[in-house]
Every structure is written in structure tokens, then in C-alpha cells.
Image (cartoon, helix red, strand yellow):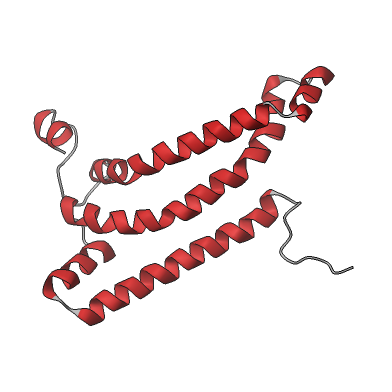
Amino acid sequence: MLFLSLKLKLFPPSGTGDIRFLVLPAFVLSIPAMATLSRVTRTTILDILKMPYINTARAKGLPSIKISIVHVLKNAIIPIVTIIGLDFGSYLNGAVVTETIFGWDGIGRFTMEGIIKRDYPVIMGCIIFGTAVFVLVNLITDILYHYLDPRIRLHAKEK
């Protein structure tokens, strides 16, 4: 905030308005997630590139872009979706700090004001709402598994 807003004057330091007001808060919320997501993505893709079916696809003469999209990305998407779904809780927690620092009105700032004023119904309501959103996002993540990987089924057939 000090460097990009006050010294270089590229972005406004706080408040709401056009897209320029969104850049710094989005950057602050995304930095921890980018590190985790890039590391998991890299590791997963390197593991998949060592698999025998990638060598078979190359031996068949498939173009590299088709191998990357059809074989590598299709198999790497499950861990990526998992990390995004699990990181959603940190986005909710980060919103409390981010909204307070950047002067945004939202549930994060409302929660922080409730904590400062010791308004227990507000605190409990915000925690219950955050928990419900977190559970819903994880449910959506689990349902996405079914569509992203046909080997994962919502219910197993009994023999």
C-alpha cells in the first residue's frame, strides 16, 4: 500500500469506486493462495509428465498442446480444485483484515466491528455465515469432482 499507492500513486490506498480500487485488496488476498496453488500445480504437473501414458501419447505423435490439455490438465485439475476449495476459508478470514485495512464495507469489516464492540450476536452470526459458506464451497468442490473426473462417483454401485 505504501509503495504502490503513496509513492508511485498507481492505485488509491482505500475506499471504493472503479476497478483501480479493487487491485490492491485482490492482490493482498491472492498472494498466499498463489504460492500454495502454484506449488501444488507444479508438483502435480511434474508427476503427471512422468506417467507412462504421457510417453505413449508422445510416441503416438500427438501434438504437445493436445497432450498438455487433454492428458496433463485433465488429470491435474482435481488437486487444483481441491486447493482452491480449501483456501476459500482463508479468503473469508483474509477479507476481515483486507476490508478493515482498505476501508471497504463488507462482512469482514462488520465482523471486526462486532469483535471490537463485543457484539456477540453479530460475531456469532458472522461466524455461522462464514461456516455455512465454507461448507457450501466444499460441497460444490466435491460435486465438481464428479464432473471433472468420471472415475469419481457420487454414489457407489453395490455388487
Residue 11 lies, with reference to residue 120, above or below; the image says above
Residue 17 x, y percent position in the rendering: 22, 49
> Total number of numbered labels?
0
Horizontal arrangement in the rendering, residue 82 relative to residue 133 (left or right): right
| Furthest-right residue in this view | 159
Out of 141 and 43, give the one closest to the viewer.
43
Locate residue 99: give its quadrant: bottom left
Point 15% across, 48% down: residue: 14
Q: Residue at x 21, y 63 (%)?
A: 109
Examine the rendered structure and indicate whether residue 128 appears above or below residue 6.
below
Q: Is residue 10 visible?
A: yes
Q: Position of residue 11 (x, y in %)?
A: 19, 37
Q: Quadrant of the N terminus?
A: top left
Q: Residue at x 71, y 49 (%)?
A: 149
Q: Determine the image quadrant of residue 9.
A: top left
Question: From what the image shows, is residue 75 above or below residue 138?
Answer: above
